[in-house]
Amino acid sequence: MLIAPKPFSQAAFVANPQAYLDVVEPGRVFQSAEPGLDVPVLDVVGRGSQQIPVGGSCDLVVKTAPLAPVSYTTMDLGTFSNGLTAITVRADEEGVAKATYTASGGVIADVSVLVGSPLASGQVSFFVFVTEPTVAVSKP
């Protein structure tokens, strides 16, 4: 997380988006665009905090520039769809990007997920509260 990622090249990303998306660099969440007139501000879509049980999942959705890369990094364990604690996905044509977070075994209580995009200004944080799984008790 503290290792600086490679500098973002919009030309290289446009030429081969999948090559950029396939590389996992947790520090990408700190690469954001300078604020400006034509620069979108990264924003949460829906809820910025959610509650899930251990082993549960939730979608973390943001709005950025259309087709922009968006990086997610969990600060407190858990995984994304790639099985790692960080992932970069591509926003759709409307600028909506989504990553699914899963509270894998050993994760409990507060989890913070930081999100950034090199084509939008700022970062956003999601907070996921992970609860003990409920156990059904059968009556004899």
Image (tube, rainbow, N blue to C red):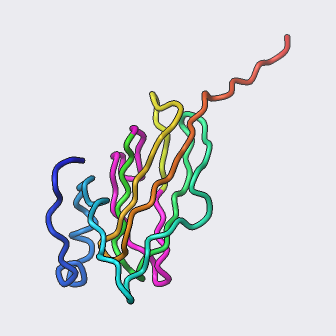
Residue closer to the observer: 14 or 76: 76
- Judge by depth and name the residue closer to the eye, 103 or 45: 45
Residue at image position (38%, 72%) is 90
The span shown in magenta is: 76-99
On the image, which quarter does residue 135 sit in? top right
Q: Residue furthest top?
A: 140
Marks counted in the figure total 0
What is the residue that sits farthest to the bottom in this orientation?
Answer: 38
Q: Residue at x 33, y 71 (%)?
A: 69
- Tell me where residue 73 appears, x and y as whole percent: 36, 51
- Foreground of the two, 35 or 120: 35
Q: Does the magenta stretch include residue 12?
A: no
Query: Would residue 123 appear left or right of 138 to someone viewing this image?
Result: left
At x 17%, y 59%, the residue is 5
Give the image location of residue 1, x and y in percent: 24, 47
Q: Quarter of the image for the C terminus: give it.
A: top right
Q: Does the magenta stretch include residue 89?
A: yes
Residue 112 to residue 88: above or below: above
In the current view of this chain or complex, which residue is farthest to the front?
A: 36
Dominant secondary-structure state across the stretch colored magenta:
loop
- Where in the figure is residue 106, as x and y percent of width and height? 45, 27
Query: Which quadrant of the view contains residue 115?
Result: bottom left
Residue at image coords 68%, 27%: 134
Q: Is residue 22 above or below residue 103?
A: below
